[in-house]
Image (spheres, rainbow, N blue to C red):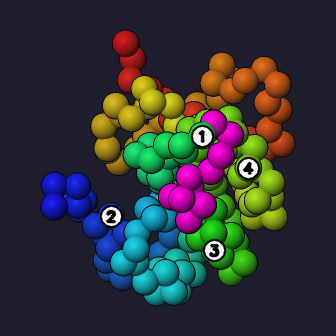
Amino acid sequence: MATLPVIDWNDCLLQALRTGSDGRQDNAYAAMVMVDPFACWEDLADLLQERGLSGVINFPPASVVEQATAAGTIDAGQEMEFRRLEWFGSLGFRTIFAASTNHVIAVAQDRLKTSLDAIVYVSPAALEVLIRDEIELTTAHGSLAADQSPSFPVYELRAPEA
């Protein structure tokens, strides 16, 4: 029981979509916990379309709590995120993928290329960022390996100042 989430973030999003104003903007993305086994994804997709949101992001990413057992592999949570984002992409939504390793960034570029707008790199230090109305993103530069040349914009969740 201790590992159950305290807040159902996807339900909070669903309630906000039902009671909030339109999000009709060119780049309005909904952050969702893509590994939620209880979410009604069809209802969420319908409300996102109705409210005019253009895309979705897997945030927080599963990789912050679940690490692949072998380097260069995708864990079960990340696979579920990819499948959900592919599904949202098939409905016409744009996607942003949150990743914590170079390998997953490369996989996201390949698997989501038809709907992918950007990637958000989430470093371990960024997990200390407090939840608030606005979270700052910066252009990722030192976070990626030298041989990594993403074909999509890569942003980084700004870690707290030391």
Mark nearer the viewer, 4 or 1: 1
Q: Which mark is residue 9?
A: 2
Q: Is residue 117 left or right of residue 130?
A: right
Task: Give the x, y percent position of residue 107.
Answer: 73, 49
Q: Which mark is residue 70?
A: 1
Pick the quarter of the image with the C terminus.
Answer: top left
Task: Give the x, y percent position of residue 155.
Answer: 63, 37
Residue 57 appears in the figure: no
Mark closer to the chain start, 4 or 1: 1
Task: Give the x, y percent position of residue 19.
Answer: 32, 79
Which amino acid is tagged 4? Val
Q: Are marks 4 and 1 in contact (CB under 8 Å)?
A: no
Label 4 crowd bin: few (<14), some (14–19), many (20+), radius 10 Å: some
Residue 79, magenta (yes or no): yes
Given the current orientation, which residue lies at the most extreme front position? 70
The span shown in magenta is 71-81
Q: Quadrant of residue 6?
A: bottom left
Residue 95, magenta (yes or no): no
Label 3, label 1: how many angstroms apart (C-alpha)?
28 Å
User: Label 4, on which residue?
Assistant: 107
Which amino acid is tagged 1? Ala
Mark closer to the chain start, 4 or 2: 2
Mark closer to the chain start, 4 or 3: 3
